[in-house]
Image (tube, grey):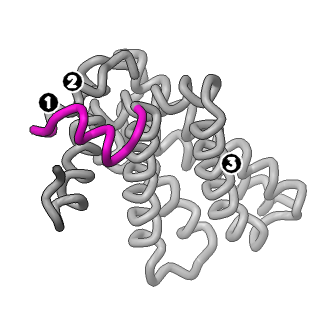
Amino acid sequence: MPKVGMEPQRREAMIRATIQTIGEAGSLDVTVSQIAKRAGMSPALAHHYFGSKDQIFLAAMRHILRSFGESVTLRLRNLEEPEARIRAIIAASFASGQFDKEIVAAWLTFYVRAMQSEDVARLLSVYARRLKSNLMYDLRKLFSPEEAEQVAQGLASLIDGFYIRHALQHVAPDRDASQALVCDYLALWMERKARG
């Protein structure tokens, strides 16, 4: 029987264990028993708190997305200039915590799992819409609606693409170089706009 008041700590332990276990495996090919053991609890208790393995994974991804959202909010605080705000969103996307091996594995699993699970696909769609919305808020102040849409798509694609390349290829640019290349894309658009 679960101890009263322990649920938040146990849920957090399960989320951390899920991210670590997926990180070691490099996929969602892990069991609830493996995750529960790492969290120091029984599989039955894990099922009690979350239900299925998919629900445990969704909780872990919500945690990662919440952390990312908090990073974006923190970086945007006190910034008013649109280009600086866009660069802050890019910086949050390439923050060191987002490139921990376990987090990278969870993200890659997230992308793959979204092709198989409607719940995961919905959560991925929420992330994609939120990223685009955050970018568009300031891009609309700099570009025409059509251009803003195009720049937002390009930035989001570069962010996701470099993230995947970084995860899968040891020859991919490092985190800082990837961020600089995404910022270069924005700078090219800014130069094009300045030339008229």
**Callout 2: SS:** helix
In this image, 191 relative to 2: left or right? right
Q: Is residue 126 visible?
A: yes
Look at 37% across and 28% down and name the residue there.
105
- Asked if the residue at tag 2 contacts the one at tag 3, i.e. Cβ–Cβ closer than 8 Å, the answer is no
| Residue 190 occupies quadrant | bottom right
Q: Position of residue 50 (x, y in %)?
A: 37, 44
Look at 14% across and 39% down and name the residue there.
41
Say which of marks 3 and 1 sits in front.
Answer: 1
Residue 129 higher or lower than 41, as above or below: below
The residue beneath circle 1 is 37
Q: Position of residue 51 (x, y in %)?
A: 40, 40
Q: Which mark is residue 28?
A: none
Residue 14 higher or lower than 71, as above or below: above
The residue beneath circle 3 is 188
Query: How many numbered badges does the structure rendering display?
Result: 3
The type of residue carrying mark 2 is: Gln
The residue beneath circle 2 is 34
Q: Position of residue 165 (x, y in %)?
A: 48, 23
Task: From the viewer's side, name the closer residue of 177 and 149.
Answer: 149
- Asked if the residue at tag 2 contacts the one at tag 1, i.e. Cβ–Cβ closer than 8 Å, the answer is yes
Region in magenta? 39-52
Residue 15 higher or lower than 79, as above or below: above
Residue 169 higher or lower than 195, as above or below: above
In this image, 66 relative to 96: left or right? right
**Distance in Å between CA atoms under marks 3 and 1:** 50 Å
Say which of marks 3 and 2 sits in front.
Answer: 2
Instruction: Tell which residue pokes out farthest to the left in this image.
Output: 40
